[in-house]
Amino acid sequence: MTAVVKHTIRSKQGTAGSAAPAQPRNSQLRRQFPHRIAQEWWPATAQGEDEVLRRLTSPPFLPQVKATRAGRRRGTAKLLRWLSSFPGGT
């Protein structure tokens, strides 16, 4: 039987077996990658179903196997129709 490990705790060198606090690393990442200002909307989110379908079924999202392409296109179209049933314009 094999065990699957989803998350591991990084330890600092020389502290084998002890868990390092996450806060200093999180602070460092927040400084390195500051949050973006929330936008009211993005042009890509206001595109119509046909344009989104075209974008999601062309490179780099285009699989090599033709049967996979057809299934992905049908699934994407079905998902977009489902999403359009919710209120809102984007």
Image (spheres, helix red, strand yellow):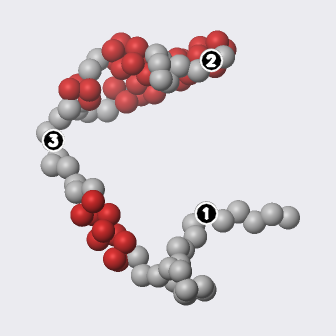
Q: Is 88 in front, or is 10?
A: 10
Secondary structure category for the residue under label 3: loop
Secondary structure category for the residue under label 1: loop
Say which residue label 3 marks: 39
Residue at point 43% right, 22% down?
A: 56
Where residue 34 sits in the image (x, y, percent)? Answer: 22, 57
Say which residue label 2 marks: 64
Give the amino acid type for the residue marked by disc 3 in the picture: Gln
Q: Which picture quadrant has residue 64?
A: top right
Say which residue label 1 marks: 6
Separation of marks 3 and 1 at Cα, in angstroms? 33 Å
> Which mark sits nearer the N-terminus, 3 or 1?
1
Give the amino acid type for the residue marked by disc 1 in the picture: Lys
Packing grade of label 2 (10 A; few <14, some 14-19, many >=20) is few
Seen in the picture, residue 83 relative to 33 is either above or below; the reply is: above
Name the quarter where the C terminus is drawn.
top left
Q: Are marks 3 and 1 in contact (CB under 8 Å)?
A: no
